[in-house]
Image: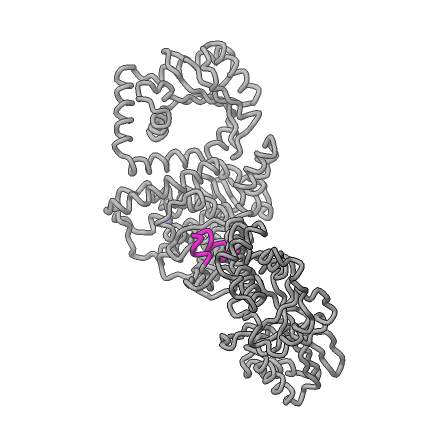
Amino acid sequence: MMTRQVELVERLKGYDPNADEDLLNRAYAFSMKVHGSQTRLSGDPFFSHPLEVAFLLVDLRLDCYSIVTALLHDTVEDTLATFEEIQDLFGPEIAKLVDGVTKISLLALQSEKTQQAENFCKLVLAMSTDIRVLLVKLADRLHNMRTLHFIPSPEKRWRIARETMDIYVPLSERMGMQSYKDELEDLAFAQLNPEARDSVLSRLKFLHETTENPVGQIMAELKNAIETADIKATISGREKTPCSIWVKMQSKNIAFEQLSDIMAFRIAVDSVKQCYQVLGTIHSSYSVVPGRFKDFISTPKSNGYQSIHTTVIGPLNHRIEIQIRTHEMHRIAELGVAAHWQYKQGESHDGRQYAWLRGLLEIMEQASGPEEFLEHTKLEMFQDQVFCFTPKGDLISLPRGATPIDFAYAVHSAVGDHTVLVKINGRQMPLRTVLQNGDQVEIITSKTQSPSPTWERFVITGKARSRIRRFIRTQQRQQFLELGRSILQKGFSNDPMALSEKNLHETAKRLNHNSIDDLYVAVGEGLQTVRDVMRAAYPEQVKAVPDFPKEKQAKEKQDSRDTAIPIKKLIEGMAVHYAGCCHPLPGDKITGIVTTGKGVTIHTQDCEVLDIFSESERIIELAWEDELNLQNCYAGRLKITFLNKPGSLASVSTTMSQQGANIANIKVTNRTIDFWDVLMDIEVKDVNHLKNVIASLRALSIINSVERI
Ligand code: MN
């Protein structure tokens, strides 16, 4: 008697005489050895499962590597065997295929709780860089579904059936594998809705009892009609599957009795020309049901499916659907992508690697228009999307190039708003990291965190961008409001009464503002000056309001502590900006210039820009708050010249870190054989902190000069 092992080898060699028999035998022995005494719930040895999967793929006439992968597909996940071991014993290509199948299986486990089947399908496709991975996985699922009834736990059976219905049925349909689709669907349906399936089956039984073998009778009549036209054809007939009948009953909300076309017939012929001849014969013999005719031969479906569909009132007055196609179209319709991957004699081994891709390309060439073409590229790979998991296993679909901030906003806007840091696959990563397929993304949030204007530079989703912008706008208004209030308080310091709510309200109205807040914002934004407000506040003295006397300003400079506007609450980058020319630090004496629509730009008091700035009413005195929050959040710029020798740059940066200063940016402006000139932006607490950094740098022997810019 032939053993299963011999049978497998014989059948493979039957269609691929050059198959690597030794490789197949080694895989068989290895898989049997590592699965050892493991058993399935059916009581069979576990090894029977990979073996059956291998036979399913032999039925599809797949290549030797696919069969070997089938034998090994559960070894890495379920036994002590490792990826490295598979690689050593069977080579990198097999190892890659086994790894692919294992990864998809693990994904399935991870996503147990998710309902996002559509995304999941795309993820599986995106991860199957080799179509054989997907074919092995589908055969694996088919065998597991055939043996599903051995699993005792109803919940587990239900879960597997649900996953099959949601993911593997649409996948096999997408790949054009009708026979896999029908069987998987029926097995899952039996599990998910046994009552519905039973009721459809009993109605079908009733139909058989009332009409003696309707399918057979109709087939005989059709055969007659076609033979009269002298065409050689293969006719097959079947009832539609219980699941598709049930879906139709539900979607059209009709009872079984009203459902007339439960029988489908298929006529296969040799040539396309004969397809249309058969169509003519059928249409002249029976009445056509309008609106049901579809010609997928001249316009193939996106998965490559070709056939003519029509519905007629056929023999016995039954409404029947008829599909007409060539034998070759039929083979492709049943096997889909697998048909393109089947072993064909005479093909060189090199090219076979890409055979499935070529198969898809062939389909594409037959496709009729750009939409069809797009459909195919979608089927091939979802290049424009990435799929990532939350720590709970929920799947989030994002456009390619998305970052953790996009991810956070996709989860929930509150998560996005409060993002502090991110862990990708367990490791802390920068927020600007571009996410990859299958990444597990954990967002760490804090109630005190709020969206940063810098995020806007790297997010790519509309949702994230609009949330960040909206936040900045609200925040900015608040900042302008605070600033405007401070400016007015200072401007009216001689007449605090003018700032009473009643007076302000009147003033705001005269300046066409709806509220006092709007007035503050306008002043903070620089749209209105203190003088504008004064004129509105004392309309009767319009002429009397003098320009800011220059002397008064100069006087203020001397005791700015008392009259200056505190900027403590203001956030850099919103209502206030630090000037790029002088890099002011806490401790420096500072002055602000109100810029229309932008708020205040802060300069050091000795900055040259102030000397050339003439509009005195836009200049305001500012002061740092005494109580500074001691974080390194101010950037000071240093120009450093040091010896060009190994370790110099390291000494500079070590000294800075010893002083607790953070390097924000480095620019090499000049490098000669003996010296480096660099510009460094370093983050410090205040001006004293920076002075300390400069002093300790100057103490280094390699330093030629350090200057603050
Ligand atoms: Mn398996």
- Picture quadrant where residue 142 is located: top left
420 or 440, nearer to the observer: 420
Indicate the position of residue 209 as horizontal and vertical percent values.
26, 17
Scheme by which the image is coloured: one colour
**Residue at screen point 59% across, 32% down:** 367
Which quarter of the figure is the N terminus placed in? top left
Q: Compared to 98, does 554 lie above or below? A: below
Front in this rendered view, residue 519 or 298: 519
> x, y (%) of residue 269?
51, 22
Residue 569 visible from this viewpoint: yes
Reply yes or no: does residue 404 show up in magenta: yes
Query: In this view, which residue lies farthest toward the front?
Result: 540
Please state if 111 lies on the left or on the right of 470 as rendered. Answer: left
Q: Is residue 53 magenta?
A: no
Counting labels gives 0
- Residue toward you, 538 or 294: 538
Question: Is 256 displayed left or right of 452 in the figure?
Answer: left
Q: Quadrant of the C terminus?
A: bottom right
Residue 260 versus residue 373 in the image, above or below? above
The extreme left residue here reads 152
- By secondary structure, the bulk of the magenta-drawn segment is best described as helix
Q: Which residue occupies 53% across, 53% down?
A: 506
Q: Position of residue 16 (x, y in %)?
A: 51, 43
Image x and y of residue 472, in percent: 53, 57
Residue drawn at (41%, 36%) of the image: 181
Question: Could you tell whether 175 is left or right of 683 in the image?
Answer: left
Residue 24 visible: no
Span shown in magenta: 402-417
